[in-house]
Image (cartoon, coloured by chain):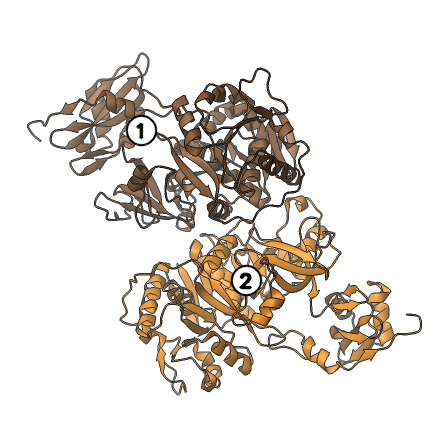
Chain colours: A orange, B brown
Amino acid sequence: MTKTLDGSLHRYTYADAYDRMCQLAHALDDLGLERGDRIASVAMNNYRHLELYFGPACSGRSLHMCNPRLPDDHFQYIINDAADSVVFLDPPFVEKVAQNADEFESVEQYVVLSDEVPEGTPLEPVVAYEDLLADQPTEYDWPALDEDEECGMCYTSGTTGKPKGVEYSHRGVYLHSMASGLADGNGISESDVVMPVVPMFHANGWGVPYAATLFGATQVLPGVHTDPEPLARLIDDEDVTMSAAVPTIWLGMAEFLEENPEVDISSIDRLTVGGSAPPESLIRKYDEEYDAPILQGWGMTEMSPLGSLSILRRELAEADPDEQYAYRAKAGIPVPGIQTRIRDEDGNEVPRDGETFGELEVRGPWVTDSYHNRPEANAESFTDDGWFKTGDIATMDDLGYIDLVDRDKDVIKSGGEWISSVDLENALMAHEAVSEATVIAVDHEKWQERPMACVVLREGADATPAELEAHLAESFPDWWLPDEYMFLDQIPQTSTGKFDKKVLRERFDDVVLEATEDE
Amino acid sequence: MTKTLDGSLHRYTYADAYDRMCQLAHALDDLGLERGDRIASVAMNNYRHLELYFGPACSGRSLHMCNPRLPDDHFQYIINDAADSVVFLDPPFVEKVAQNADEFESVEQYVVLSDEVPEGTPLEPVVAYEDLLADQPTEYDWPALDEDEECGMCYTSGTTGKPKGVEYSHRGVYLHSMASGLADGNGISESDVVMPVVPMFHANGWGVPYAATLFGATQVLPGVHTDPEPLARLIDDEDVTMSAAVPTIWLGMAEFLEENPEVDISSIDRLTVGGSAPPESLIRKYDEEYDAPILQGWGMTEMSPLGSLSILRRELAEADPDEQYAYRAKAGIPVPGIQTRIRDEDGNEVPRDGETFGELEVRGPWVTDSYHNRPEANAESFTDDGWFKTGDIATMDDLGYIDLVDRDKDVIKSGGEWISSVDLENALMAHEAVSEATVIAVDHEKWQERPMACVVLREGADATPAELEAHLAESFPDWWLPDEYMFLDQIPQTSTGKFDKKVLRERFDDVVLEATEDE
């Protein structure tokens, strides 16, 4: 049985879904879509979106999953770059799509994912999804596809430049799904009840909808209801065993659960967390208070996305809890099937000592080998022998655990040594007077780059640069300490809520620090 | 750490094994082996055999795993048919190899898997494995292989005709290994301690050595010590979590454990059982007395071999124990990645009612699409659209569980209906006077075929055909009951200990039953 939530609860079985996937494939035929054509979805996690994951792909088309939170110029760019011919959209996104529709170059049809087209919808031509499917046959003569044919596409929402398109193949999705079912992976199985909170437009919903369907797990899709309360109640009501989301979701849910102790989420076997690293304290809290273990993972859109998971290796089974939590807060060990290496700027692999930084590179059957229409980005991101340069700066220890240190463009390259902006930021934000902090590189006469801290103080709190420096000096060597502290009212953020270092770098582009006498 | 047992205990790590796999690859280069050349192993489960699984394959050669229990004519046939150029053999098999060596057409080198060549070894040229590896470099520049290249080969030891060779590709072995790690499969993981008892020459050791190495599980290889006592003590001493063997191994171990209650095998998470169906009573006993669940599987050499596993579906989680055991005694549901269908003689799929028989057909990425050098067998066993006709007669129920009824050549085709010889045999052997029983088809004037029972009575016991017929009539419809009962001193057996129905069919080839008046 597949369970979905779409405002009210909608429940149906895989057999029901299959019938509708067949109907959808017929409807695409009737719309004149050819093999290899792309359609776009602008939708949240719901059962119709699940049907869009399969009906088009299995009939030889590709589903481009669009992030409706992109700024308009990027939103227009991705639909034109992908040359989508049909756009399927949830009713809440009618406005977003309509305000960009004039700029779409390839779209010939809009389909609103609902029973009826909402009154006043300014899209043309437009049809309701249920009208599109009605009266279509519930059997379909699926074509024999080549495994390398494209089945889906997502764009990376990079903080710099235009989004880059990643094409997914049937082969890659199949293998990624198998990896998602490994006992040494997410372990998705027939007996699971999975609830992907990560949006299905974000890196294939981390592959959960594909894997859950392959293994026949029950799927609970929360639709637009991603606030802590409805999510927690869904877990409790539906006995969800596995869920996947960014850390902020679980931070918010912890607050809700504290105030509502009658809600029980102990049916959870593991909460897969990715997107950014969860604080170790959050992992502890979910273990100790909710009996709901957090499993941290790392991946990228270019990797379908699964790259590593912080499962505990056998060597750590008897380790003390503090050591175990320290390992579980890392990005983890590579998922079987993924090769990793970490290289320094000269291209040499760095020692597996857990300390030496380098750029993390990956290779494997569900890692893309190029971006769509972006030869210049390809030259930068892919080696000749098939490695993808992730742009993440990382260490690896002797047990194979990867720890992410920084993004390549954020790390501060000071006199041939690297300084992690992330480590400095976390330490600054641990100071009682600091609300927000970000650390960027600024040019330096002698050291090429030096760190500069941009700090937002808590309301009513105060701190001098000297006080913050003394605080940081407790944890870092002298040469890591920022040369400058800028006190700001706020730190600019990206559309996904991350600190926007690009804006800060541009703002302080003309800062050049001079060498002091003792340097 | 990889642990192996080779007479005494031999322990080493994967890093140690890797060094030796590199040395082995260099040694094959020095022997002049080209890409695609085959070597043969005649060996039990030990660490040198594990090295043979990887060093040759990863350097572009193929390992042909030979069953040393084959009759001489078949043993000669498979080595000549595979055109093996080097034979690697355990010391206990020197005699077996030597008595056939004169007939080998392609073998240019023998390598005894030991420190020294045993005195008086009549093979020429011959070298000890350790001498072959000594002084070779412990790094190797592995070639980039095509995934479809052959990495291994096994022969089916069919009871009729010559053995048929099955070629395994890197692609197939990789995917089979991924399937072996699924939470919905064998679930082999990094934290496992696996002990394959099934010989490594038997269908890739059911793929356990490959999967355990991919996931980094500890491997415990029992060598020639496959009696109940050493196996049980290994499980206890090494905290084995997963083991794989035919049912007779676990039947024997149960007897040992009854007499030696101090030996504790409760470290076992699952005992994978295949080759033939374990009695339901054995599954119960291992649950109740040893806390060591038996997981039944079904597969074939042609399938690498994994096809189905009798995991309990969610729908059965709350079922009463009797119903659960009945399901767990079936062949199980297809492993994710394997497609199955059951067709009748007209090629129509039979209903999924758990009752209607048909031939089980399978398709999937680790199912072979042809036999080596056997075009006539290929035409018989493979459909044009990639299905392998297993020769197994089976039913499937509405939950997708497969139940094996008979081998195609053993099922009795009576007037357009099929009668399961296996069901009749099991019922006959449940009669107190019967020691052994087998049921074969004999020609019939009107019904084409009718069942004839061949029965061996227990010493001192007696039973008439009428008594046996009355016994069977309690369980089966009239038209299933055998027309004839032959009382024999013994039933001929194959080299693998199965009843040899081929011999019986030949012996009773001239029997033609006449139609009776009321038919």
Q: Amino acid at mark 2?
A: Asp
Label disc, if present, on residue A229 of the rendered structure: none
**Left or right relative to A308: residue A42:** left
C-alpha gap between disc 2 and disc 1: 57 Å
Q: Nearer the viewer, mark 2 or mark 1?
A: 2
Residue drawn at point x = 48 percent, y = 27 percent: B254
What residue is shown with label 1?
A: B426
Q: Residue furthest left?
A: B517
Residue A25 image point, x, y percent? 34, 67
Chain of the residue under the numbered disc 1 shown in the image: B
Q: Amino acid at mark 1?
A: Asn
Chain of the residue under the numbered disc 2 shown in the image: A
What residue is shown with label 2?
A: A369
Q: Nearer the viewer, residue A10 or A468?
A: A468
Q: Nearer the viewer, residue B515 or A76?
A: A76
Residue A2 image point, x, y percent? 41, 61
Asked if badge 2 and badge 1 are on a common chain, one would say: no
Q: CB under 8 Å between callouts 2 and 1?
A: no
Quadrant of the rendering where the C terminus of chain B is positioned: top left
Dividing the picture into quarters, in which one does residue B512 lie?
A: top left
